[in-house]
Image: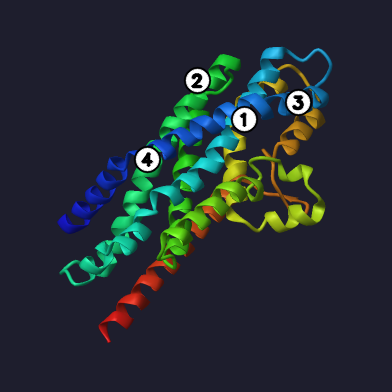
Protein backbone atom coordinates (compact mmCIF):
# COMPACT_ATOMS: atom_id res chain seq x y z
CA UNK A 1 0.00 0.00 0.00
CA UNK A 2 2.87 2.37 0.77
CA UNK A 3 4.34 1.73 -2.68
CA UNK A 4 1.00 2.44 -4.33
CA UNK A 5 0.54 5.81 -2.64
CA UNK A 6 4.18 6.72 -3.24
CA UNK A 7 3.64 6.12 -6.96
CA UNK A 8 0.37 8.07 -6.94
CA UNK A 9 2.12 11.02 -5.29
CA UNK A 10 4.91 10.75 -7.82
CA UNK A 11 2.49 10.84 -10.78
CA UNK A 12 0.51 13.76 -9.38
CA UNK A 13 3.67 15.69 -8.55
CA UNK A 14 5.08 15.20 -12.05
CA UNK A 15 1.78 16.32 -13.60
CA UNK A 16 1.60 19.52 -11.60
CA UNK A 17 5.33 20.10 -12.03
CA UNK A 18 4.87 20.15 -15.80
CA UNK A 19 3.64 23.75 -15.98
CA UNK A 20 2.66 23.56 -19.64
CA UNK A 21 0.50 20.44 -19.25
CA UNK A 22 -1.02 21.61 -15.97
CA UNK A 23 -1.85 25.12 -17.18
CA UNK A 24 -3.23 23.74 -20.44
CA UNK A 25 -5.47 21.31 -18.55
CA UNK A 26 -6.58 24.01 -16.11
CA UNK A 27 -7.09 26.83 -18.58
CA UNK A 28 -8.83 24.73 -21.23
CA UNK A 29 -12.11 24.34 -19.24
CA UNK A 30 -12.13 28.05 -18.46
CA UNK A 31 -11.53 28.89 -22.11
CA UNK A 32 -14.35 26.52 -23.07
CA UNK A 33 -16.65 28.29 -20.61
CA UNK A 34 -15.83 31.66 -22.18
CA UNK A 35 -16.30 30.27 -25.70
CA UNK A 36 -19.60 28.65 -24.75
CA UNK A 37 -20.79 31.90 -23.19
CA UNK A 38 -19.69 33.92 -26.20
CA UNK A 39 -20.96 31.71 -29.04
CA UNK A 40 -23.36 29.04 -27.77
CA UNK A 41 -25.25 31.10 -25.18
CA UNK A 42 -27.14 33.08 -27.82
CA UNK A 43 -28.10 29.91 -29.71
CA UNK A 44 -29.30 28.23 -26.53
CA UNK A 45 -31.15 31.37 -25.44
CA UNK A 46 -33.02 31.65 -28.73
CA UNK A 47 -34.03 28.00 -28.58
CA UNK A 48 -35.33 28.37 -25.01
CA UNK A 49 -37.27 31.54 -25.86
CA UNK A 50 -38.86 29.76 -28.82
CA UNK A 51 -39.89 26.81 -26.64
CA UNK A 52 -41.12 28.81 -23.61
CA UNK A 53 -44.51 30.53 -23.34
CA UNK A 54 -44.58 34.19 -24.31
CA UNK A 55 -43.56 36.49 -21.49
CA UNK A 56 -41.29 33.97 -19.74
CA UNK A 57 -39.09 35.68 -17.09
CA UNK A 58 -35.72 36.66 -18.54
CA UNK A 59 -33.98 35.43 -15.39
CA UNK A 60 -35.47 31.97 -15.93
CA UNK A 61 -34.36 31.94 -19.57
CA UNK A 62 -30.83 32.97 -18.60
CA UNK A 63 -30.71 30.35 -15.84
CA UNK A 64 -31.71 27.66 -18.34
CA UNK A 65 -28.92 28.79 -20.66
CA UNK A 66 -26.41 28.78 -17.79
CA UNK A 67 -27.42 25.30 -16.69
CA UNK A 68 -27.06 23.93 -20.19
CA UNK A 69 -23.66 25.57 -20.64
CA UNK A 70 -22.42 24.28 -17.27
CA UNK A 71 -23.53 20.72 -17.97
CA UNK A 72 -21.94 20.84 -21.44
CA UNK A 73 -18.66 22.11 -20.03
CA UNK A 74 -18.42 19.44 -17.33
CA UNK A 75 -19.55 16.63 -19.63
CA UNK A 76 -16.66 17.39 -21.99
CA UNK A 77 -13.95 18.25 -19.46
CA UNK A 78 -14.43 15.17 -17.27
CA UNK A 79 -13.28 12.99 -20.17
CA UNK A 80 -10.92 15.19 -22.17
CA UNK A 81 -9.00 16.36 -19.09
CA UNK A 82 -8.74 12.72 -17.97
CA UNK A 83 -6.97 11.89 -21.23
CA UNK A 84 -4.58 14.79 -20.68
CA UNK A 85 -3.92 13.78 -17.06
CA UNK A 86 -3.30 10.17 -18.05
CA UNK A 87 -0.67 11.05 -20.66
CA UNK A 88 2.00 10.45 -18.02
CA UNK A 89 1.50 6.73 -18.64
CA UNK A 90 2.64 7.26 -22.23
CA UNK A 91 5.34 9.77 -21.31
CA UNK A 92 6.93 7.22 -18.97
CA UNK A 93 7.24 4.87 -21.95
CA UNK A 94 8.95 7.47 -24.11
CA UNK A 95 11.36 8.60 -21.39
CA UNK A 96 12.29 5.07 -20.31
CA UNK A 97 10.77 5.39 -16.84
CA UNK A 98 8.41 2.50 -17.62
CA UNK A 99 11.40 0.24 -18.36
CA UNK A 100 12.95 1.22 -15.04
CA UNK A 101 9.73 0.31 -13.24
CA UNK A 102 9.70 -3.04 -15.09
CA UNK A 103 13.03 -4.10 -13.56
CA UNK A 104 12.20 -2.74 -10.12
CA UNK A 105 10.42 -4.63 -7.31
CA UNK A 106 7.23 -2.68 -8.05
CA UNK A 107 4.46 -5.00 -9.18
CA UNK A 108 2.92 -4.14 -12.54
CA UNK A 109 -0.58 -4.27 -11.08
CA UNK A 110 0.38 -1.68 -8.47
CA UNK A 111 1.92 0.55 -11.14
CA UNK A 112 -1.18 0.28 -13.35
CA UNK A 113 -3.48 1.11 -10.44
CA UNK A 114 -1.33 4.09 -9.46
CA UNK A 115 -1.72 5.61 -12.92
CA UNK A 116 -5.50 5.26 -12.70
CA UNK A 117 -5.79 6.75 -9.20
CA UNK A 118 -3.48 9.65 -10.07
CA UNK A 119 -5.49 10.37 -13.22
CA UNK A 120 -8.73 10.46 -11.23
CA UNK A 121 -7.22 12.74 -8.59
CA UNK A 122 -5.73 15.30 -10.98
CA UNK A 123 -8.83 15.32 -13.18
CA UNK A 124 -11.10 15.89 -10.17
CA UNK A 125 -9.00 18.86 -9.07
CA UNK A 126 -9.18 20.51 -12.49
CA UNK A 127 -12.86 19.69 -13.09
CA UNK A 128 -13.65 20.89 -9.56
CA UNK A 129 -12.20 24.29 -10.49
CA UNK A 130 -14.23 24.24 -13.72
CA UNK A 131 -17.42 23.35 -11.83
CA UNK A 132 -16.88 26.12 -9.29
CA UNK A 133 -16.32 28.65 -12.10
CA UNK A 134 -19.40 27.40 -13.89
CA UNK A 135 -21.56 27.71 -10.77
CA UNK A 136 -20.41 31.32 -10.36
CA UNK A 137 -21.43 31.94 -13.98
CA UNK A 138 -24.85 30.33 -13.40
CA UNK A 139 -25.37 32.39 -10.23
CA UNK A 140 -24.66 35.56 -12.19
CA UNK A 141 -27.33 34.65 -14.75
CA UNK A 142 -30.02 33.34 -12.41
CA UNK A 143 -29.86 30.82 -9.57
CA UNK A 144 -32.55 28.17 -9.18
CA UNK A 145 -30.38 25.22 -8.11
CA UNK A 146 -30.88 23.60 -4.73
CA UNK A 147 -28.09 22.23 -2.55
CA UNK A 148 -29.08 18.69 -3.53
CA UNK A 149 -28.78 19.61 -7.22
CA UNK A 150 -25.22 20.85 -6.66
CA UNK A 151 -24.29 17.70 -4.73
CA UNK A 152 -25.79 15.45 -7.39
CA UNK A 153 -23.95 17.42 -10.07
CA UNK A 154 -20.72 16.80 -8.15
CA UNK A 155 -21.60 13.08 -8.01
CA UNK A 156 -22.17 13.09 -11.77
CA UNK A 157 -18.78 14.73 -12.22
CA UNK A 158 -17.10 12.07 -10.06
CA UNK A 159 -18.70 9.19 -11.99
CA UNK A 160 -17.83 10.72 -15.35
CA UNK A 161 -14.23 11.33 -14.23
CA UNK A 162 -13.98 7.68 -13.19
CA UNK A 163 -15.33 6.72 -16.61
CA UNK A 164 -12.97 9.08 -18.44
CA UNK A 165 -9.96 7.82 -16.48
CA UNK A 166 -10.88 4.21 -17.27
CA UNK A 167 -11.42 4.95 -20.97
CA UNK A 168 -8.14 6.85 -21.23
CA UNK A 169 -6.30 4.04 -19.43
CA UNK A 170 -7.50 1.46 -21.96
CA UNK A 171 -6.66 3.63 -24.98
CA UNK A 172 -3.36 4.97 -23.64
CA UNK A 173 -2.25 1.42 -22.86
CA UNK A 174 -1.62 0.92 -26.58
CA UNK A 175 0.23 4.21 -27.12
CA UNK A 176 4.01 4.41 -26.98
CA UNK A 177 5.09 7.63 -28.74
CA UNK A 178 4.52 11.36 -28.36
CA UNK A 179 3.01 11.50 -31.85
CA UNK A 180 0.39 8.89 -31.01
CA UNK A 181 -0.35 10.68 -27.75
CA UNK A 182 -0.90 14.03 -29.46
CA UNK A 183 -3.04 12.46 -32.20
CA UNK A 184 -5.34 10.75 -29.70
CA UNK A 185 -5.55 13.88 -27.57
CA UNK A 186 -6.55 15.96 -30.60
CA UNK A 187 -9.22 13.49 -31.73
CA UNK A 188 -10.72 13.18 -28.25
CA UNK A 189 -10.71 16.94 -27.63
CA UNK A 190 -12.30 17.68 -30.99
CA UNK A 191 -14.81 14.85 -31.22
CA UNK A 192 -15.98 13.82 -27.76
CA UNK A 193 -18.21 16.85 -27.22
CA UNK A 194 -20.21 15.95 -30.33
CA UNK A 195 -20.70 12.24 -29.67
CA UNK A 196 -21.73 12.74 -26.02
CA UNK A 197 -24.37 15.35 -26.86
CA UNK A 198 -22.63 18.22 -25.09
CA UNK A 199 -22.30 20.56 -28.09
CA UNK A 200 -25.63 19.67 -29.68
CA UNK A 201 -28.42 17.79 -27.88
CA UNK A 202 -29.12 14.34 -29.28
CA UNK A 203 -32.78 15.28 -29.59
CA UNK A 204 -31.80 17.74 -32.34
CA UNK A 205 -29.91 15.13 -34.37
CA UNK A 206 -31.45 12.70 -36.82
CA UNK A 207 -33.25 9.64 -35.53
CA UNK A 208 -30.54 7.27 -36.78
CA UNK A 209 -27.74 9.26 -35.19
CA UNK A 210 -29.73 9.54 -31.97
CA UNK A 211 -30.21 5.78 -31.79
CA UNK A 212 -26.49 5.21 -32.42
CA UNK A 213 -25.36 7.69 -29.75
CA UNK A 214 -27.78 6.21 -27.21
CA UNK A 215 -25.44 3.21 -27.01
CA UNK A 216 -22.52 5.36 -25.79
CA UNK A 217 -22.05 5.67 -21.99
CA UNK A 218 -20.87 9.28 -22.24
CA UNK A 219 -24.31 10.24 -23.52
CA UNK A 220 -25.85 9.18 -20.22
CA UNK A 221 -23.25 11.13 -18.27
CA UNK A 222 -24.18 14.27 -20.19
CA UNK A 223 -27.89 13.66 -19.59
CA UNK A 224 -27.32 13.21 -15.85
CA UNK A 225 -25.57 16.56 -15.70
CA UNK A 226 -28.37 18.15 -17.73
CA UNK A 227 -30.90 16.72 -15.24
CA UNK A 228 -29.25 18.19 -12.17
CA UNK A 229 -28.01 21.46 -13.70
CA UNK A 230 -31.54 22.24 -14.94
CA UNK A 231 -33.62 20.59 -12.20
CA UNK A 232 -34.28 23.89 -10.41
CA UNK A 233 -35.20 25.64 -13.65
CA UNK A 234 -37.68 22.92 -14.66
CA UNK A 235 -39.18 22.93 -11.16
CA UNK A 236 -39.63 26.70 -11.35
CA UNK A 237 -41.42 26.31 -14.69
CA UNK A 238 -43.84 23.90 -13.07
CA UNK A 239 -44.28 26.31 -10.16
CA UNK A 240 -45.26 29.06 -12.59
CA UNK A 241 -48.10 26.86 -13.78
CA UNK A 242 -46.73 26.12 -17.23
CA UNK A 243 -48.40 23.17 -19.00
CA UNK A 244 -46.74 19.84 -18.30
CA UNK A 245 -46.33 19.21 -22.01
CA UNK A 246 -44.34 22.45 -22.39
CA UNK A 247 -42.01 21.61 -19.51
CA UNK A 248 -41.55 18.06 -20.85
CA UNK A 249 -40.81 19.39 -24.33
CA UNK A 250 -38.13 21.74 -22.97
CA UNK A 251 -36.55 18.91 -20.93
CA UNK A 252 -36.58 16.66 -24.00
CA UNK A 253 -35.01 19.34 -26.21
CA UNK A 254 -31.89 19.60 -24.01
CA UNK A 255 -31.59 15.86 -23.23
CA UNK A 256 -32.59 16.30 -19.60
CA UNK A 257 -34.87 13.41 -20.53
CA UNK A 258 -33.08 10.80 -22.62
CA UNK A 259 -34.74 8.18 -24.79
CA UNK A 260 -33.52 4.77 -25.90
CA UNK A 261 -35.41 3.80 -29.07
CA UNK A 262 -38.41 5.82 -27.96
CA UNK A 263 -38.40 4.70 -24.31
CA UNK A 264 -37.56 7.25 -21.60
CA UNK A 265 -34.46 6.25 -19.62
CA UNK A 266 -34.85 6.72 -15.83
CA UNK A 267 -32.08 8.53 -13.96
CA UNK A 268 -31.29 5.37 -11.98
CA UNK A 269 -30.70 3.46 -15.21
CA UNK A 270 -28.39 6.24 -16.45
CA UNK A 271 -26.31 5.86 -13.29
CA UNK A 272 -26.27 2.08 -13.74
CA UNK A 273 -25.13 2.35 -17.38
CA UNK A 274 -22.33 4.77 -16.52
CA UNK A 275 -21.17 2.74 -13.50
CA UNK A 276 -21.32 -0.57 -15.40
CA UNK A 277 -19.40 0.88 -18.36
CA UNK A 278 -16.73 2.19 -16.01
CA UNK A 279 -16.44 -1.19 -14.31
CA UNK A 280 -16.11 -2.94 -17.68
CA UNK A 281 -13.39 -0.55 -18.84
CA UNK A 282 -11.49 -1.00 -15.57
CA UNK A 283 -11.77 -4.75 -16.04
CA UNK A 284 -10.44 -4.50 -19.60
CA UNK A 285 -7.56 -2.34 -18.37
CA UNK A 286 -6.75 -4.89 -15.65
CA UNK A 287 -6.79 -7.74 -18.18
CA UNK A 288 -4.50 -5.82 -20.54
CA UNK A 289 -2.03 -5.16 -17.74
CA UNK A 290 -2.24 -8.79 -16.59
CA UNK A 291 -1.59 -10.05 -20.10
CA UNK A 292 1.39 -7.77 -20.49
CA UNK A 293 2.82 -8.98 -17.16
CA UNK A 294 2.38 -12.60 -18.22
CA UNK A 295 4.17 -12.01 -21.51
CA UNK A 296 7.03 -10.21 -19.74
CA UNK A 297 7.43 -13.11 -17.29
CA UNK A 298 8.01 -15.66 -20.03
223 sits to left or right of 123: right
For mark 2, does the 10 Å Cα neighbourhood hold few (<14), some (14 to 19), or many (20 or more) residues? few
| Quarter of the image where the C terminus is located | bottom left
Instruction: For residue 279, say whether it is visible.
Output: no
Query: According to the image, label 3 marks what residue?
Result: 48
Count of numbered circles in the view: 4
- For the residues labelled 4 and 2, the Cα–Cα distance comes to 26 Å
Q: Earlier in the sequence, mark 1 or mark 2?
A: 1
Label 1 crowd (10 A; few <14 / some 14-19 / many >=20): many
Residue pointed to by mark 4: 20
Locate residue 73: give its quadrant: top right
The mark found on residue 136 in the picture is 2
Name the residue carrying label 1.
Answer: 36
User: In the shown orientation, is residue 124 left or right of residue 164?
Assistant: left
What is the distance, in whole Å, between disc 1 and disc 4 at their CAs? 23 Å
Circle 2 SS class? helix
Q: State left or right for residue 122 relative to residue 6.
A: right
Amino acid sequence: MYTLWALVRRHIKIFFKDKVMFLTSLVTPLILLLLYAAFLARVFKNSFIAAMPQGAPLKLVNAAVGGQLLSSLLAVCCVTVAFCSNMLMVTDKTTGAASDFAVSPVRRSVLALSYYIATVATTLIICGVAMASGLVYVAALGWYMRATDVLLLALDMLLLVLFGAALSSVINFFLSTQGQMQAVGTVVSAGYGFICGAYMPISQLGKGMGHALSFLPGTYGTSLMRNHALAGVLKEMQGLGWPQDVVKSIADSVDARLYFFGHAVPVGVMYAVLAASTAVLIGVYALLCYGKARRAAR
